[in-house]
């Protein structure tokens, strides 16, 4: 269930690649999505989200990295929740 939701939201967000490690999960956005996103809104949402999401801009791609070591929830649930909240805020403003 969360996998379908995540795939739908990730496509809408412009996620090009998802890298899952033992303690971190990183989303790499496409160059087009990286150029079109509102950076301030993304930074505010990433900073306020628990667990905190680190942002990095490298080679014209935005990387969102979440440390999942101390969380009990699965990364799919957490990123689906983050993406959903991001789009909810975008619709409201």
Image (cartoon, rainbow, N blue to C red):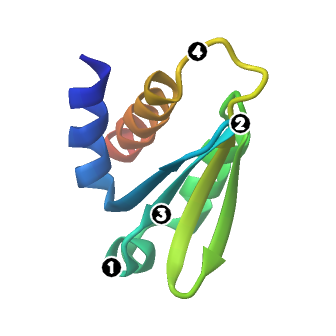
As measured in the structure, the alpha-carbon distance from the residue carrying label 2 to the one carrying label 3 is 17 Å
Dot 1 falls on a residue whose secondary structure is helix
In this picture, is 16 found above or below 82?
A: below
* Along the viewing direction, whichever of 42 and 31 lies nearer the viewer: 31
Which residue does the image show at 50% across and 77% down from the upper left?
A: 61
User: Which of the two labelled residues, at mark 4 and mark 1, occupies the earlier sequence position?
Assistant: 1
- Is the Cβ of the residue at disc 3 closer than 8 Å to that at disc 4? no
Image disc number at residue 32: 1
Marks 2 and 3, the one that precedes in the sequence? 2
Of tags 4 and 2, the one toward the viewer is 2
- Give the SS element for disc 2: loop
Taking 52 as reference, is 59 left or right? left
Given residues 48 and 32, the one toward you in this image is: 32
Tag 3 secondary structure: strand
Which image quarter is the N terminus in? top left
Mark pair 4, 2: CA separation: 12 Å
Can you identify the residue that label 4 sits on?
73
Q: Indicate the quadrant where residue 40 lies.
A: bottom right
Name the residue carrying label 2.
23
Q: Residue 1 carries which label?
A: none
Residue that badge 3 annotates = 28
């Amino acid at each position: 269930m969360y996998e379908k939701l995540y795939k739908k939201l990730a496509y809408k967000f412009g996620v090009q690649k998802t890298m899952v490690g033992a303690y971190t999960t990183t989303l790499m956005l496409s160059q087009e999505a990286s150029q079109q996103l509102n950076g301030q809104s993304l930074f505010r949402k990433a900073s306020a989200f628990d667990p905190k999401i680190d942002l990095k801009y490298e080679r014209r791609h935005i990387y969102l990295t979440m440390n999942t070591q101390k969380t009990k929830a699965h990364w799919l649930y957490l990123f689906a929740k983050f993406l959903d909240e991001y789009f909810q805020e975008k619709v409201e403003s």
